[in-house]
Amino acid sequence: DQKDEIKWIWLTGYENAFPGHSQYYRNDEIEKNDILVLCNHCDNPPCVRACPTKATFKNQDGIVAMDYHRCIGCRFCMAACPYGSRSFNWRDPRDDKEMMNNLNREFPTRMRGVVEKCNFCADRIGRGLEPACAEACGASKAIVFGDLNDPNSEIRQVLKEKYTIQRKPALGTQPSVFYIV
C-alpha cells in the first residue's frame, strides 16, 4: 500500500522533481526516465525549525539527521519539507517478515508512529564508509557523496566539471544534493 511506503530514496518524474526548471521540448531521455530523488540535506532546513522535540537536527557533518527515539510523530517536519522527503511510519517495521529476514543488524529498527527520511546512512559515515546508495552505485559514480566544504573532494570536482541543478533552489533552503541531468 502506497500509504505505508517509507521513502528514503525514490523515483519521480522530471516535472515533479524540478518544477522550477521548465524546459520546452525536453529530449526523450529526460521525458521518459524518472529521476532518483532523496532528502536534500538542506543548509537551511525548514524541517529542523518545525520539529518541536529537536528529533530532527543537523549533525556535525551537515547531514539533516533524526533521533527516532525523540520523534513524537507529530508530522510537523513533513508539513515543513517542501520536497516530500519524509514518510510517516504507519506500521511497526518489525511486523514485516521479509524485512526482518533481511534485517541490517548494524542499524536499529524504528517503531510505528515516527517520521523517517534519508540520513545519508550517518551510521556508516561515522565508521568511515560511504552511504549505502553511493556504495551500491560503485564505479558507475551515479551517486557521488563527499564533503562540499572541501575544494579538493571528489564531489567538488564533479560539480566543477558537470552541469548540475538543485531541487527548488528558489525556496531558500539551500539544498546540498545536486543532480546531473
Image: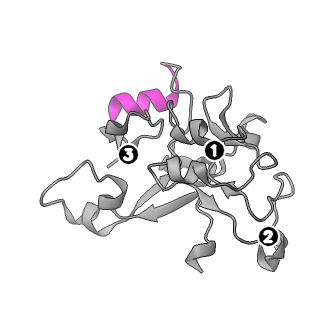
Q: Residue, x 70% and y 70% (percent of image)?
A: 90
Mark 3 is on which residue type?
Arg
Q: Quadrant of residue 17?
A: bottom left
Residue 143 percent coordinates (x, y): 51, 47
The range drawn in magenta is 152-162
Mark with earlier residue (2, 1): 2
Residue 120 circle label = 1
- Which mark is drawn over residue 167? 3
Identify the residue shown where x is 27% and y is 60%. Answer: 30
In the rendered structure, the answer to whether residue 56 lies left or right of residue 86 reads right
Residue at numbered disc 2: 92
Instruction: Estimate the spatial distance between the alpha carbons at disc 2 and disc 3, rounded to whole Å.
Output: 31 Å
Q: Secondary structure at mark 3?
A: loop
As measured in the structure, the alpha-carbon distance from the residue carrying label 2 to the one carrying label 1 is 22 Å
Counting from the top left corner in percent of width and height, residue 113 is at 74, 62
Disc nearer the start of the sequence (1/3): 1
Does 47 sit left or right of 60 as displayed?
A: left
Q: Residue furthest left?
A: 25
- Lower sequence index among marks 2 and 3: 2
Q: Is residue 16 left or right of residue 174?
A: left
- SS label for mark 1: loop
Which residue occupies 82% across, 48% down?
69
Residue at point 84%, 54% (across, down): 108
Q: Is residue 89 above or below residue 107?
A: below
- The x, y position of residue 153, in whole percent, is 52, 25
